[in-house]
Image (spheres, rainbow, N blue to C red):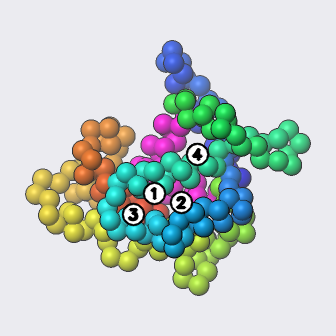
Amino acid sequence: MLKKTLTYSDLDGNPVTEDFYFSLSKAEIAEMELSYDGGLQTHLKRIVANKDGAAIIGAFKNILTSSVGRRSEDGRRFIKSDEITQEFMQTDAYSELFMELVTDADASAAFIRGIVPAALSEKMENNEKGQNVLVSDVQGETLKSSVIDEMDNRPAWIKENRDPTKHELAGMSREELVVAMQQKMQKIAASQ
């Protein structure tokens, strides 16, 4: 289980700091794995290879919304419900966390490792048998390189080989967002 302390603005613009909890059980991970043809790892490889920005964003959103919940007071249960998920998504806390995960590969990798059971997280850390457990080995050929080679007027974040800022993300075209998400997935895979 991962506890994330997020600071965001409420509807009146006042800063709010709140703790949120995220976790995926072994059963939930198995269900995710079985819900895709060829498994979650194959699905993630496919959407990155196809440069499908909407599917990449959807995958991040699915993992995020599937993992949010609340600890029971006695610490025995992790409670999830549509109400808890909607409550989280209807605050700027969701936006803040989503943007952090999209713009920071290290934060994304830490988030994934933090929400899976400890034994699975350890396997991911040790990279057993040369495979990553959740995000798979999307490394291979650098997907963004072919896109970058075709671009004459590349954005600064690509030229500088860095993650885009929140401001840059907000002003991106669909194609640029696809490239940003591909770069993000590659960094996550490389850090596993």
- Residue 109 numbered mark, or none: 2
Residue identified by numbered label 4: 65
Q: Nearer the viewer, mark 2 or mark 4?
A: 4
Q: Residue furthest bottom?
A: 129
Q: Which residues are magenta?
A: 93-114
Residue type at numbered disc 2: Ala
Any magenta on residue 104?
Answer: yes
The residue carrying mark 1 is 105
- State the residue at coordinates (59%, 25%): 16
At label 4, the amino acid type is Thr
Residue drawn at x 65%, y 62% as measured from the top left:
31
Q: Disc 3 on helix, strand or loop?
A: helix
Instruction: State how far apart marks 3 and 2 are (Cα).
Output: 18 Å
Q: Earlier in the sequence, mark 1 or mark 4?
A: 4
Q: Is residue 62 left or right of residue 1?
A: left
Q: Kindly identify which residue carries mark 3.
A: 47
Mark 3 or 2, closer to the camera: 3
Say if mark 1 contacts mark 4, CB within 8 Å: no
Label 4 element class: helix
